[in-house]
């Protein structure tokens, strides 16, 4: 994301440590939160992939830049559209909401394929034209066209994000509310590099999961003791 390969790899390292702490805590204390707990580790992979984008760009290695960009956008345009509703589904206790999240997983899979497959195939509308630096961040320039206009694609993406806030699990809602807030802020302040910038801050925000899990465990222990 912002600044350099060092920033991307540094954030990836931090996320690995945070993800390891979250995962260990979930395994020992409440496996219900396991998928949420490993989320920082998955964000670490995405941040590391953007570190490779930086290296490819800085060294003028076009092939590396393109392949690393495709991997990075795999997370941004496809993976998270499936993973986040899956996490919400696993934490949901109400039957109708669990069914609702199954629908969102299916929608995320189809919509994600629509967004990412042209990037993977490097052809047709919405394939990568080039990856460049805009200010202090990376810009992923995609070709125009496709069945859905840009505004429609962005609206669907945003709507899916908002719908995850319907989760009955208060811990997940707190985490995802922060992610969405950061998304809104970066959209209006870093519009040109929004994909890169929001993913960076969303990744860092996953470190909050550890503190949410710790507080949840303490509250649970206190309730059992009373």
Image (cartoon, rainbow, N blue to C red):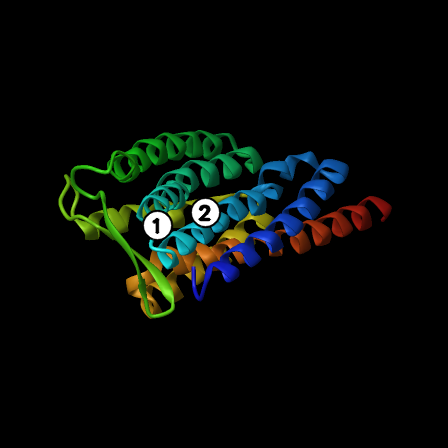
Numbered disc 2: secondary structure: helix
Q: Which residue is mark 1?
A: 61
Q: Residue at x 75, y 51 (%)?
A: 219
In front: mark 1 or mark 2? 1
Dot 1: within a 10 Å radius of its alpha carbon, few (fewer than 14), some, or many (20 or more) residues? few
Q: Which mark is residue 39?
A: none
Q: Is residue 209 above or below residue 136?
A: above
Mark toward the start of the polypeptide (1 vs 2)? 2
The mark total stands at 2
Looking at the picture, tell me which residue is in the foreground, 58 or 204: 58
The image position of residue 182, as x and y in percent, is 44, 62
| Image-quadrant location for residue 192 | bottom left
Q: Residue at x 25, y 52 (%)?
A: 130
Q: Which residue is mark 2?
A: 49
Numbered disc 1: secondary structure: loop
The image position of residue 216, as x and y in percent, is 70, 50
């Amino acid at each position: 994301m912002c600044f350099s390969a060092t920033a991307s790899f540094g954030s990836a390292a931090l996320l690995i440590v945070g993800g390891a702490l979250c995962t260990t805590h979930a395994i020992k204390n409440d496996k219900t939160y396991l998928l949420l707990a490993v989320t920082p580790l998955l964000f670490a992979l995405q941040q590391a992939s953007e570190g490779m984008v930086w290296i490819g760009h800085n060294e003028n290695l076009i092939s590396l830049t393109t392949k690393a960009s495709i991997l990075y956008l795999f997370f941004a345009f496809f993976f998270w559209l499936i993973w986040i509703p899956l996490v919400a589904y696993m934490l949901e206790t109400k039957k109708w909401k669990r069914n609702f999240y199954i629908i969102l997983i299916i929608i995320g899979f189809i919509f994600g394929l629509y967004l990412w497959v042209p990037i993977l195939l490097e052809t047709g509308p919405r394939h990568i034209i080039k990856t460049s630096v805009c200010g202090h961040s990376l810009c992923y320039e995609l070709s125009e066209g496709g069945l859905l206009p840009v505004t429609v694609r962005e609206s669907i993406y945003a709507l899916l994000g908002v719908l995850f806030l319907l989760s009955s699990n208060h811990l997940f809602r707190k985490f995802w509310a922060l992610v969405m807030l950061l998304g809104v802020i970066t959209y209006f302040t870093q519009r040109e590099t929004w994909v890169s910038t929001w993913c960076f801050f969303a990744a860092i925000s996953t470190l909050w999961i550890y503190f949410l899990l710790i507080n949840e465990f303490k509250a649970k222990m206190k309730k059992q003791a009373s």
